[in-house]
Image: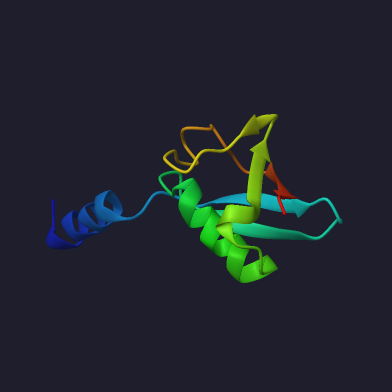
Amino acid sequence: MNSMEYQTKFEYEDDEKPKIRVKVKTVLGKERTLLLKPNEGIKFIRTIIQREFYITPEQQCLVCEGVILEDGKTVKDYKMDNGSIINLIVNY
């Protein structure tokens, strides 16, 4: 194996996991597509939503496939994949 092959293999092993496209939809019909890594936490998603929709994490109820998403879990824990939809419900 030459040094170029080794470096390519090394970079691939250290490369981050591929990102998946997940849509966030509001009750009012607004939507945003997020590019997420499988190990990203729900708390991180709440931060993105706050920046995009101006809704604080405390006001957010996130639901994916009928399951309420919890802060201590990740995208992978909920088996989200390309095309998954997170419904955003605002609690006032």
- Tell me: 46 left or right of 73: right
Residue at 72% across / 54% down in the picture? 92
Residue at the farthest top position:
66
Q: State the image coordinates of residue 32 (x, y, percent, origin top left).
A: 71, 61
* Callout count: 0
Q: Quadrant of residue 52?
A: bottom right
Query: Looking at the image, which residue is at 54% across and 32% down?
Result: 79
Counting from the top left corner in percent of width and height, residue 63 is at: 67, 39
Query: Relative to residue 62, is residue 54 depicted above or below?
Result: below
Q: Nearer the viewer, residue 70 or 58?
A: 58
Give above or below for 81 relative to 56: above
Q: Residue at x 62, y 43 (%)?
A: 82
Q: Residue at x 86, y 56 (%)?
A: 28
Q: How is the image coloured?
A: rainbow
The x, y position of residue 39, in whole percent, is 40, 45
Residue furthest front as drawn: 92
- Left or right: residue 61 compared with residue 45: right
Image vertical order of residue 82 relative to residue 2, above or below: above
Tell me where residue 65 sits by quadrant: top right
**26 and 34: which is toward the camera:** 26
In this view of the protein, which residue sits in the foreground, 57 or 85?
Answer: 57
Residue sitting at the far right: 28
- Give x and y (percent) for residue 23: 69, 51
* Most foreground residue, 76 or 51: 51
